[in-house]
Amino acid sequence: MRKLVAAAIAVALLAAVAAAFAAWRVERFMTTPVQVADEGTSFEIVPGSSFSSVTGDLVDAGFIDDDTWLRLYARWTGEEGGIHAGEYRIARGATPRTILEQFTSGAVQLHSFTIIEGWNHRDLLAALHAHDKIDASMTSEDWPALLAALGATQAHPEGLFLPETYRFPRDTSDRELLTQAYELMQSVLAEEWAAKGDETPVSTPYEALILASIVEKETARADERARIAGVFARRIDKRMRLQTDPTVIYGIGADFDGNLTRKHLRTDTPYNTYTRRGLPPTPIAMPGRDAIHAVLHPAAGNELFFVATGLGDGSHKFSATKAEHDAAVAEYLRRLRQRRNN
């Protein structure tokens, strides 16, 4: 009987030692950094992958030499059935434990896409389709259907998508990103509209988008947006034509070759603010939040005109009278000729 008890104790001790060793070995493996390049490496789990195939892929990719301890750990913790498909970024210093946490939490690698202030809807769609991580699912003919699906009351996509940087997992569709940009524009526009000043010349949020898009195309300088918005506000109040070149160019469309002529300025289109009073029918570009804010809080003053200075810094010369403006235009043309001659 004593021999049986001693044998049982010996077996129990051996089992305890083996279990302790296995636990130590697993813990050491799970906390030892894997082999990865300094800049990190992408790793993909395809939909439907088993846990063993994923750990095998980690071995094949050179992250770990053997997957035995990882599989054992996942079995002990019950995590082997909780991994998510997707593209992951494994960073320098990652361990099998942190990698498993990524896989089970679905912390997939995110890519970025930036909508630039002043883009038109053609620029936007072209940039979406040029991004190799975005699924191109629509064409220019699909804009009306997308707008209808978004619940937009406008039939034209221009100006409805907020310039911002968006983060997304690989294979996100262009429609999904456009939905994010549309919803963010609606949120920002509502917030800015709720805080608008009494001096704004626009009467609806959509008119704010239209005028903001013009301000966006007229200047990239933060210190000029409210001032240019002020010029337009006073011209609207005095029933003067806006006479802004970007609207004319937008009315010409994709055929514009970069050379704006007197004939263009005299040719009437719905967007020609030299031939028509008031705002054009739609925005002419994607305005950023700062341009929207400027239109809803235009700078006070008596200036009714502005023209580029020609100094090369994107600045403008503002004038209160036509005579002052004509002199500023002459100065701009003089600088332009001088730069060409040099």
Image: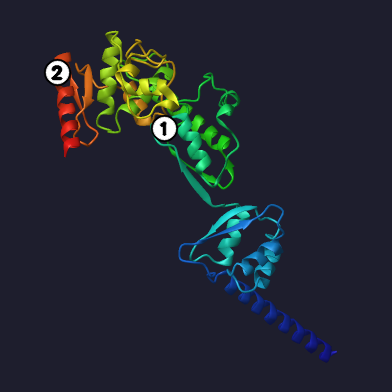
Crowd band around label 2 with a 10 angstrom C-alpha radius: few (<14), some (14–19), many (20+): some
- Which numbered tag is attached to residue 329? none
Disc 1 marks which residue? Answer: 119
* Residue at 59% over, 73% down: 29
Identify residue type, mark 1. Trp
To which quarter of the image does residue 331 belong? top left
Task: Pick the residue in front: 184 or 37.
Answer: 37
The residue under the point 34% across, 24% down is 246
Q: Horizontal placement of 125 versus 66: left or right? A: left
Instruction: Give the mark nearest the N terminus, 2 or 1.
Output: 1
Quarter placement of the C terminus: top left
Which percent across, then down, holds residue 303? 20, 18
What is the residue that sits farthest to the bottom in this orientation? 3
Residue type, mark 2 in image: Glu
Quarter of the image with the N terminus is: bottom right
- Left of 311 or right of it: where is 101? right
Q: CA distance from mark 2 to mark 1?
A: 32 Å
Q: Residue at x 47, y 42 (%)?
A: 113
x and y percent of residue 300 in the render? 22, 19
Q: Indicate the secondary structure of the residue bearing disc 1.
A: loop
Residue 105 in the image: above or below residue 126: below
Residue 237 screen position, x and y as percent: 29, 10
| Front one among 196 and 61 | 61
Vertical order, 20 against 94 (above or below): below
Q: Which residue is mark 2?
A: 324
When asked about the image quadrant of residue 20, the answer is bottom right
Q: Number of labelled discs?
A: 2
